[in-house]
Image: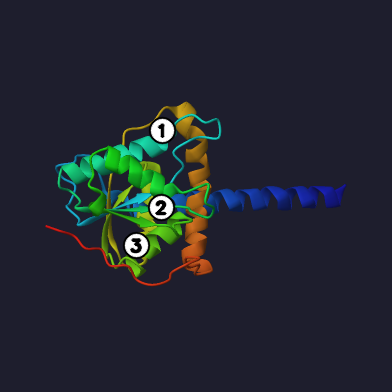
């Protein structure tokens, strides 16, 4: 019986420590990046390049993905307003049947962004990969991150860790029934980001040759 109590105490102690670590990592990520999140487009600094982080255009059910739709709308708006002059679409392309960058590029062109102003990053398998490749492969030290706000904090955190000047535009909240699960997952993803950067020094899965972005003023 005594052993059972000891095991129970250890179990609850570990849960407590885990919760403290998760909470601390989330505070760290948000606190260090919140000043780079802009609510008014007039106040958003101009950057030559915007980085759209990848997601599927469709849900498993086949319905349109509102996260994808919102990212495309924001990217097109920032381009048309002159806040960015070129766009990197970075996402997963591990099979010929799943191509996030191509889907994003096509949607941006349909939204009025010139094809010549878009470059595709096919090795943005994770947010970490997309951000690091933005600097090391595409040569950008300043970026406007384009994704949902709760995701932007982690992306900017990674960018700042690698010495980049990053900003993001605060997006309108999507309905809770759509975003709640993803927001909960993001809480754990921020903890993993701190682990990746500070503990195991994880890098992108693929780098490869540098790609020059030619921007016509």
Residue 69 is situated, as x and y percent measured from the top left of the image, at 36, 35
Residue 130 is situated, as x and y percent measured from the top left of the image, at 40, 58
Residue at x 85% of width, y 52% of height? 3
Q: Secondary structure at mark 3?
A: helix
Specify the farthest residue to the right.
Answer: 1
Is label 1 or label 2 in front?
Answer: 1
Q: Secondary structure at mark 1?
A: helix
Residue 107 is situated, as x and y percent measured from the top left of the image, at 33, 40
Specify the farthest residue to the bottom.
Answer: 209
Residue contact between numbered discs 1 and 2, judged by CB atoms under 8 Å: no
User: In what quadrant of the picture does the C terminus appear?
Assistant: bottom left
Q: Residues within 10 Å of mark 1 (few under 14, many from 20)?
A: some
Judge from the rendering whether residue 7 lies leftward or rightward of residue 107; answer left or right: right
Instruction: Write down the residue under mark 2.
Output: 154
Marked residue nearer the N-terminal end (2 or 3): 3
Marked residue nearer the N-terminal end (1 or 2): 1
Instruction: Write down the residue under mark 3.
Output: 134
Q: Residues within 10 Å of mark 3 (few under 14, many from 20)?
A: many
Residue 66, which numbered label? 1
Residue at x 49% of width, y 69% of height? 201
Judge from the rendering whether residue 157 lies leftward or rightward of residue 189; answer left or right: left
């Amino acid at each position: 019986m005594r052993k059972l109590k000891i095991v129970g105490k250890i179990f609850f102690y570990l849960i407590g420590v885990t919760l403290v670590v998760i909470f601390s990592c989330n505070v760290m990520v948000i606190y260090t990046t919140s000043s780079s999140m802009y609510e008014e487009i007039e106040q958003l600094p101009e950057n030559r390049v915007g980085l759209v982080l990848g997601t599927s255009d469709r849900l498993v059910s086949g319905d349109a993905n509102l996260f994808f739709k919102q990212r495309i709308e924001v990217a097109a708006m920032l381009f048309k307003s002159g806040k960015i002059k070129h766009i990197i679409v970075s996402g997963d392309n591990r099979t010929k049947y799943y191509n996030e960058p191509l889907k994003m590029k096509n949607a941006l062109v349909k939204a009025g962004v010139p094809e010549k102003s878009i470059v595709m990053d096919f090795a943005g398998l994770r947010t970490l990969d997309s951000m690091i490749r933005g600097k090391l492969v595409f040569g950008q030290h300043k970026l406007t991150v384009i994704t949902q706000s709760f995701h932007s904090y982690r992306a900017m955190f990674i960018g700042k860790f690698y010495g980049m000047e990053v900003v993001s535009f605060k997006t309108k909240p999507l309905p809770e029934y759509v975003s709640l699960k993803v927001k909960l997952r993001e809480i754990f993803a921020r903890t993993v980001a701190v682990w990746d950067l500070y503990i195991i020094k994880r890098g992108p899965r693929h780098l490869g040759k540098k790609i020059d972005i030619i921007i016509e003023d």
